[in-house]
Image (tube, rainbow, N blue to C red):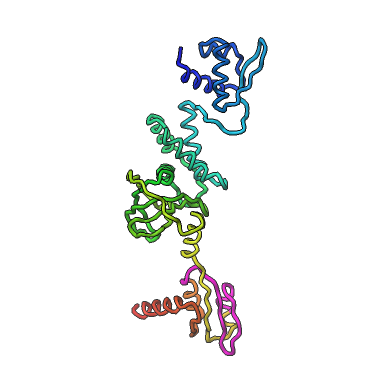
């Protein structure tokens, strides 16, 4: 006969696989007496599993819904399905699901036997996902980073910047943030000695170093606010104001769809908002008239730079 702990796990697995088990059949499957079965059921109840019993000759047992979710027992096929499903959910379009999926995925992968890891990898390699998220993220990368955040363990990785430059990073990971259809890692960069947010789809070959660290104080209310603030700085809008020495009617005809044009004597005042100064520079060139940059100063610098390059050409 199996020992008590093994038999209890076997009982739990059987109860999870069938909605209802007649008592006699369940005892036979476990190779125990009805009395021993009742003791094993009581043991499961003590562990928090809500097992309901139906008395009588045809009585039996079934798992009921409880107040909290107790630990589950799954077989090999179910474990593989669970991991693949969580990987898909981590990159799916359902709000509020992605971050929870990564947390659960990290817990499951940590205890997944090696033989099942091979099956998961093979299934993922032969499946083409229809991702809704901008920038595909390797679930393995997400899992590694999530565990490093949880365990306060330093991590090394290669990061590719927006301009294509690749650098090796050594960081203390703080939190993963799902924002704007992308994943971001908030971490303290040990090379640059400052907090950074990294797009996870640009992060490759993450590896924990085994070095634990004491978490630092994040210079923001939370990780999501830190990422939002960095994105605002990166993509901040420029409020452009230019005095164009040409009739307002002429300027409206040429670029009026993208800006506000106001009369200013024989000239006109042009205002527009843009995330990049490239478009205002090109628009002012299309006008075909002299102009004076009122703001921002960066626009005047860019116009001078473009003018010098055009002159050299």
Residue 140 placement (x, y as % from top left): 41, 42
Residue 146 placement (x, y as % from top left): 43, 45
Residue 142 placement (x, y as % from top left): 43, 45
Quarter where residue 190 is shown: bottom left
Quarter where residue 122 is shown: top left
| 238 sits left or right of 304 in the view | right
* Vertical relation: 151 (above or below) 304: above
Q: Which residues are magenta?
A: 252-278
* Vertical relation: 112 (above or below) 42: below
Query: Which image quadrant: the C terminus?
Result: bottom left
Residue 228 placement (x, y as % from top left): 51, 59
- Farthest bottom residue in view: 266
* Vertical relation: 61 (above or below) 164: above
* Vertical relation: 257 (above or below) 250: above
Q: Nearer the viewer, residue 13 or 71?
A: 71
Q: Residue at x 57, y 26 (%)?
A: 49
Q: Residue at x 59, y 87 (%)?
A: 264
49 magenta-colored: no
277 magenta-colored: yes
What is the total number of numbered labels drawn onto the structure image? Answer: 0
Quarter where residue 68 is shown: top right
């Amino acid at each position: 006969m199996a020992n008590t702990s093994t038999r209890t796990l076997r009982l739990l697995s059987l109860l999870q696989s069938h909605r209802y088990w007649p008592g006699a059949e369940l005892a036979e499957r476990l190779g125990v007496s009805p009395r021993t079965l009742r003791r094993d059921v009581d043991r499961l109840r003590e562990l928090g599993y809500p097992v309901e019993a139906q008395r009588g000759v045809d009585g039996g047992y079934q798992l009921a819904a409880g107040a909290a979710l107790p630990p589950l027992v799954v077989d090999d096929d179910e474990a593989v399905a669970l991991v693949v499903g969580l990987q898909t959910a981590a990159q799916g379009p359902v709000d509020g699901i992605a971050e929870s999926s990564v947390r659960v995925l990290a817990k499951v992968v940590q205890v997944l036997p090696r033989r099942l890891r091979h099956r998961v990898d093979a299934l993922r390699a032969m499946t083409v996902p229809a991702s809704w998220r901008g920038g595909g993220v390797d679930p393995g990368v997400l899992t590694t980073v999530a565990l490093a955040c949880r365990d306060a363990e330093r991590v090394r990785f290669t990061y590719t910047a927006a301009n294509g430059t690749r650098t090796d990073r050594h960081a203390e990971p703080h939190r993963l943030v799902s924002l704007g259809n992308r994943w971001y890692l908030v971490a303290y960069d040990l090379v640059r000695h400052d907090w950074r947010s990294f797009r996870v789809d640009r992060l490759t070959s993450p590896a924990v170093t085994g070095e634990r660290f004491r978490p630092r104080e994040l210079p923001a209310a939370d990780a999501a606010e830190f990422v939002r603030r960095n994105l605002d700085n990166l993509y901040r809008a420029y409020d452009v104001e230019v005095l164009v020495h040409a009739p307002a009617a002429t300027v409206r005809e040429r670029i009026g769809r993208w800006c506000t044009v106001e009369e200013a004597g024989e000239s006109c005042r042009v205002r527009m908002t843009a995330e990049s100064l490239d478009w205002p520079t090109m628009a002012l060139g299309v006008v075909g008239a002299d102009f004076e940059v009122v703001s921002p100063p960066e626009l005047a610098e860019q116009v001078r730079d473009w003018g010098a390059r055009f002159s050299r050409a």
